[in-house]
C-alpha cells in the first residue's frame, strides 16, 4: 500500500505523538509498504529527507510565518482550519506519492480536507488528544479542573485564557467548524483509548471508529541498549535508586500533586524529574529532587533501569500514557492516576497502583507502600513487563494494516469498542 502520514511535528522534534508517527511509519515501511510523511518545516531542517525507508516532506504554511502567534518557536503548530499554502503543498506531495491511504494525526489534516476527494485516497484519522472538542486539547477547564463538557461561553472563556482574547476566539471558531467538516470527511477514526473516543464525543456522533493503542518497537529496546551514546545524560542520575517522573512539568501532568506528596515522605530516595519546562511549571523543587530537563528518548529508556518505580500522577485525562508503558517494559511498576488511558495500561494491584487523581495523601501512601515492600515491587515489576509485551509492534501494527485494507476494499467501518491488547 501507498501510505501518507500527516503530522504537524516529526523528529527531531520530540514528543509522544512524534515518536508514534515515526515508529508507525518505520514499521509499515519494514513490512513492504511505501510510506511518506508530510510535516511542518522548521528552521534548520531540510525540505525533504529520507528517514530510513520513509520519505519526509517538510512543508511551509502561511500561519507558521507569523512568528508572533507562537510562544514556542520550535513548535509552530498547524492551525485548526485549512491553511491555503499548506493545502497547496500537500497537493504537490499527493501528486508525487499518489497515496491510497492518508493517515492524519493532528490539526494538519484540516489542510488536507479540501483536496481529499480529488486525491482519491481513503482518510484515516488517529486522535491522540481531545482536539475535536477542546482547543486546549486536554479537557481541562482554565487549566485547573476537569471540564464537564463543551459549552459556548465556557469554551470561549477557556480559549481566551489559553491563547489570548482575539486568537482564542478565532481558534475556537475555526476548530469547531473544522471538526464538523472532519467528522463528515474522515473515512475511519482511530483512537488510542476508549477514553479518547468518549472525550471527543465520537460514540455520541455515531462516526466510525476503532481503538488501536500505541505500541513499543524493537528500536526502543535497541535504544535502551546503546549506553555509550547517552552516557553524558546518565551520569547526572543519582548513584542510588530513585523515583522517576517523565513528562512536561505541567499542572495537567500532576507535577504539583507529586511535589506535595513527595514532600510528605520521610527519608525517601531521590525524586528524578525528566521533562520540559512549561508556562505553569512550579517555581520550586522539593528537597532531594533533581530536575534534569528534556532528554532524548533513548536516554529516558535507560533512566528507567535505575528507578524503583515510575510516577504518572496526572490530574487531566491522559489519552494513553506511553511513558507508563515504557516504564513497565523495563520491569518497573507504575503509580498512576485512575483516569483516561492510564487505567487501560496499569492494572491496579498487579502492575502498579491506580489512585484518585489529585489526591496528595493517596499518592503519598502509594509511594510509601512500594518503598517499604521490595518483594511487592519486584512482583509488580515482573507483571508489568509481561503486560507491556501485549503492546509490542508486531501485535499492534497488524491492526493498522487491517484497517487500511478494509477501507480500500470498501468494507463497512462500524463503530468498534475496546479490543484487548
Image: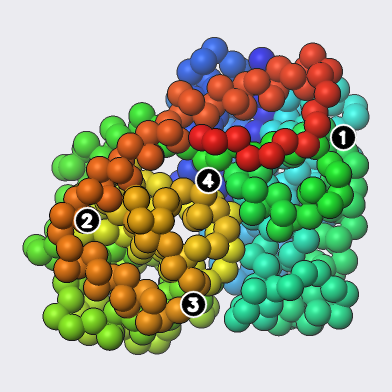
Task: Classify mark 3: helix, strand or loop.
Answer: loop
What's the CA distance linking mark 2 and mark 1?
Answer: 53 Å
Residue that label 1 marks: 115
**Can you tell which quarter of the image residue 244 is in?**
bottom left
Q: Earlier in the sequence, mark 2 or mark 4?
A: 4
Please identify, in this view, whether the residue under mark 2 or under mark 1 is nearer the observer.
Answer: 2
Q: Earlier in the sequence, mark 2 or mark 3?
A: 3
Q: Residue 105 at x, y = what percent?
A: 66, 43
Callout 1–callout 4 Cβ contact below 8 Å: no
Left or right of residue 134: residue 175? right
**Residue 141 position within the rendered picture, expressed as x and y whole percent measured from the top left:** 68, 77
Q: CA distance from mark 1 to mark 4?
A: 24 Å
Q: CA distance from mark 4 to mark 3?
A: 28 Å
* Vertical placement of residue 160 versus 173, above or below: below
Q: Residue at x 87, y 34 (%)?
A: 115
Q: Which mark is residue 358?
A: 3
Task: Name the residue at 74% across, 73% down.
Answer: 148
Earlier-in-chain disc, 4 versus 3: 4
Considering only order in the chain, which callout, 3 or 1, is on the residue closer to the N terminus? Answer: 1
Q: x%, y% of residue 120?
A: 85, 22
Mark 2 — residue?
377
- Mark nearest the camera among 2 and 4 is 2
Tell me which corner region of the image, top left, top right, bottom left or bottom right, holds residue 37: top right
Horizontal side of 124 relative to 144 (left or right) equals right
Near mark 2 (Cα within 10 A), the count class, few <14, some 14-19 or many ≥20, is: many
Amino acid at each position: 500500500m501507498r501510505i501518507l502520514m500527516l503530522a504537524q511535528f516529526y523528529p527531531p522534534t520530540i514528543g509522544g505523538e512524534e515518536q508514534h508517527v515515526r515508529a508507525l511509519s518505520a514499521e509499515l515501511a519494514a513490512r513492504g509498504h511505501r510510506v511518506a510523511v508530510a510535516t511542518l518545516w522548521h528552521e534548520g531542517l531540510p525540505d525533504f529527507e529520507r528517514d530510513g525507508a520513509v520519505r519526509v516532506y517538510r512543508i511551509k504554511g502561511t500561519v507558521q510565518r507569523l512568528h508572533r502567534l507562537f510562544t514556542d518557536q520550535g513548535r509552530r503548530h498547524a492551525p485548526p482550519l485549512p491553511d491555503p499554502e499548506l493545502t497547496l503543498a500537500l497537493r504537490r506531495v499527493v501528486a508525487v506519492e499518489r497515496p491510497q491511504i492518508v493517515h492524519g494525526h493532528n490539526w494538519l489534516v484540516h489542510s488536507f480536507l479540501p483536496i481529499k476527494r480529488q486525491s482519491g485516497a481513503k482518510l484515516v484519522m488517529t486522535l491522540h488528544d481531545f482536539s475535536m472538542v477542546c482547543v486546549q486539547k486536554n479537557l481541562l477547564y482554565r487549566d485547573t479542573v476537569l471540564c464537564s463538557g463543551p459549552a459556548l461561553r465556557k469554551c470561549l472563556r477557556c480559549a481566551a485564557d489559553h491563547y489570548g482574547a482575539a486568537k482564542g476566539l478565532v481558534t475556537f471558531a475555526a476548530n469547531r467548524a473544522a471538526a464538523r467538516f472532519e467528522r463528515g470527511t474522515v473515512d475511519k477514526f482511530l483512537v488510542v483509548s476508549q477514553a479518547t473516543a468518549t472525550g471527543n464525543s465520537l460514540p455520541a456522533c455515531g462516526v466510525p471508529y476503532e481503538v488501536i493503542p500505541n505500541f513499543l518497537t524493537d528500536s526502543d529496546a535497541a535504544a535502551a541498549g546503546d549506553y555509550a551514546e547517552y552516557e553524558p545524560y546518565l551520569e547526572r542520575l543519582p548513584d542510588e535508586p530513585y523515583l522517576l517522573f517523565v513528562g512536561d512539568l505541567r499542572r495537567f501532568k500532576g507535577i504539583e500533586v507529586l511535589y506535595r506528596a513527595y514532600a510528605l515522605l520521610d527519608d525517601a530516595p531521590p525524586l528524578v524529574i525528566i521533562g520540559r519546562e512549561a508556562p505553569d511549571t512550579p517555581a520550586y523543587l522539593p528537597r532531594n529532587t533533581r530536575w534534569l530537563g528534556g532528554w532524548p528518548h533513548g536516554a529516558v529508556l535507560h533512566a528507567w533501569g535505575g528507578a524503583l518505580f515510575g510516577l504518572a500522577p496526572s490530574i487531566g485525562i491522559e489519552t494513553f500514557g506511553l511513558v507508563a508503558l515504557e516504564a513497565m517494559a523495563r520491569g518497573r511498576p507504575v503509580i498512576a492516576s485512575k483516569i483516561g488511558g492510564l487505567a487501560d495500561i496499569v492494572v491496579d494491584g498487579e502492575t502498579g497502583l491506580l489512585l484518585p487523581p489529585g489526591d496528595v495523601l493517596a499518592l503519598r501512601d502509594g509511594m510509601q507502600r512500594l518503598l517499604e515492600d521490595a518483594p511487592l515491587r519486584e512482583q509488580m515489576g515482573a507483571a508489568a513487563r509481561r503486560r507491556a509485551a501485549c503492546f509490542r509492534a508486531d501485535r499492534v501494527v497488524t491492526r493498522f494494516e487491517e484497517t487500511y485494507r478494509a477501507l480500500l476494499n470498501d468494507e463497512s467501518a462500524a463503530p468498534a469498542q475496546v479490543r484487548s491488547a
